[in-house]
Image (tube, helix red, strand yellow):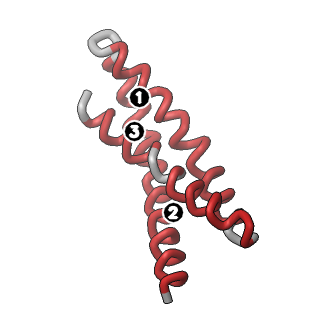
Amino acid sequence: MRHETKNTALAWTTALALALVPVAFVFGALGGMAEQVHPEAVAVLKVFWLASWTATPLLALAGWLLRRRPALAGAGRWTGWIAVVPVPVTILLASRL
């Protein structure tokens, strides 16, 4: 039972992160307009923006593939949870500019 709830939670977070990638892409692209006013914040935003549409899908896929092997299941869970981070950070940073 507990193993099923971990899979369900990871499935929902992965689906939510991948669904929000286009939103993060648009917010990050629009955040670049504030570069003259907040150059440091936009530099951090660009890093997370790039990670949100490049690393998030790859980390989510790697997280699910690693979970198939029992020896790598822990690494797969960590990879799956880390894949979620860049998307909301990009949206939050861009909305604060």
* Circle 3/circle 1 CB separation < 8 Å: yes
Looking at numbered disc 3 in the image, what kind of residue is underneath it? Answer: Thr
The three-letter amino acid code for the residue at tag 1 is Leu
Which numbered disc flags the more N-terminal residue, 1 or 2?
A: 2
**Image: 78 above or below 7:** above
Front one among 73 and 12: 73
- Measured Cα–Cα span from mark 3 to mark 1: 6 Å
User: Badge 2: few (under 14), some or many (20 or more) residues near its Cα, within 10 Å?
Assistant: many
Which quadrant would residue 7 be assigned to in this image? Answer: bottom right
45 left or right, relative to 11: left
Residue 45's disc is 1
Residue 65 picture location, percent across and down: 71, 64
As shown in the figure, which amino acid type bears the numbered disc 2?
A: Thr
How packed is label 1: few (under 14 Cα within 10 Å), some, or many (20 or more)?
many
- Residue 28 to residue 73: above or below: above
- Judge left or right: residue 24 versus residue 51: left
Residue 93 numbered tag: none
Res. 14 mark: 2
Front in this rendered view, residue 55 or 3: 3
